[in-house]
Amino acid sequence: MPSLKDLRNRIASVKATQKITKAMQMVAAAKLRRAQEAAEAARPYSERMGSVLANITQAIGGGGDAPALMTGTGKDDVHLLVVCTAERGLCGGFNSQIARLARDHIRKLLADGKQVKIICVGKKGFDILRRDYASMIIDRVDLREVKTLGFVNADAIAKKVIHLFNEGGFDICTLFYSQFKSVISQIPTAQQIIPAGVASAPAEATDGGNAVYEYEPEPGEILSDLIPRNISVQVFRALLENVAGEMGAKMSAMDNATRNAGDMINKLSITYNRQRQAQITKELIEIISGAEAL
Amino acid sequence: MPEAFKFELVSPERLLVSEQVESVVIPGAEGEMTVMAHHAPVMTTIKPGVVTVKTAAGGEERYVVFGGFADIVPAGCTLLAESAVAVKDVDRADLARRIQEAKEDATDAKDDEARSKAEQFLSQLTTLEGAILPA
């Protein structure tokens, strides 16, 4: 049985922890709001990009001059996985969910006899995947120093991937990230970015959407400029969703932790009070029985 | 007074402009062009340069863009810029850094094609610097 002093210390330390988790929850909530705003602000760009891309692919009509980034190399022997996770832990199952999805994917690919290469974005995913697949990790991107995620960061990652592709480093590239659905639900997602699976032009009835476009320079040239940019945009979106997801996960994890700490404090206080009462009773009995003996 | 149309300037980070304008001057890859209402559908890449927007209210705004492309339809014009800032907010240091990077690219270029591309980009950047410095 712990002594009264031990119990007191214990309660104090749980209270301190609760304060920390509470503060972390509030910080995460504030950051989540910002991350959500950023994700929303980035949405118009990627939407427009999608529709423009659809338009232009339609114009080219899958002709032979589509760049390799879009058509692929025609093989699927070497797979590149870009696994985006958070830089920090303490956010529930967020990182391990993404890593698990990636791991399942890797296992499947390996079983099919494919070669796998991994680029880790974020420290946590690297830590998890390093255990089993250290030899396949060819690069890792550290965004730890980055305060507000900019397009530049995503662009750098995309450039790396494209460079590797141009050197013939891989055939298919898949992006792993967590889709931000709501504060309590983030869905780990795998998205193929190379070859770019452009959705066949949606039958958009926008005014002038079906008009014959003039292209300056040639459609093929625009497309070869557009596709790398589109990849950057996809990466950027993935990173933004990830940040929002991480903050959401952290917020609910810390909320749980705060609540648990509260429960723990309650239980400990009850034990503490009981024990104190027992001690008082014991002392009283001693005094009374002492007095009776006289 | 010319008819107004909808103009949107979007960068990956946010939507900068979305309003009714009279005309927009775009630094297209094959020369500057002024877009007004009922323009024929054009899609063009843009080079680093200044976008001048004449709003329907009569004001004039200028933005610096670093590459991207424009999607023009009769009903409006959407400019997707890789990065865009209002001229008055341009960060000289950032511009200088981009120029420096472009210079390095030009020197590091492996083949002629890459080098000419990098040099072209560099010259566009320096022109741009010249255009906005007095501002």
Image (cartoon, rainbow, N blue to C red):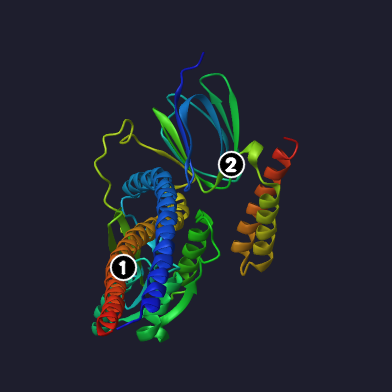
Residue at the location (36% across, 45% down)?
A47
Q: Give the image location of residue B44, x and y in percent.
A: 48, 42
**Distance from Cα at disc 2 to Cα at disc 1:** 58 Å
Residue at the location (58% across, 41% down)?
B85
Q: Residues within 10 Å of mark 1 (few under 14, many from 20)?
A: some
Residue at the location (59% across, 29% down)?
B61
Tell me the kind of residue under disc 2. Val
Q: Which mark is residue B85?
A: 2
Q: Give the quarter of the image for residue A77.
A: bottom left
Q: Give the quarter of the image for residue B32.
A: top right
What subunit carries mark 1?
Answer: A
What subunit carries mark 2?
Answer: B
Badge 2 vs badge 1, beta-carbon distance below 8 Å: no
Q: Which mark is residue A144?
A: none
**As drawn, which residue projects farthest toward the right?**
B134
Can residue B95 be seen in this snapshot?
yes
Tell me the kind of residue under disc 1. Ser
Q: Which mark is residue A269?
A: 1
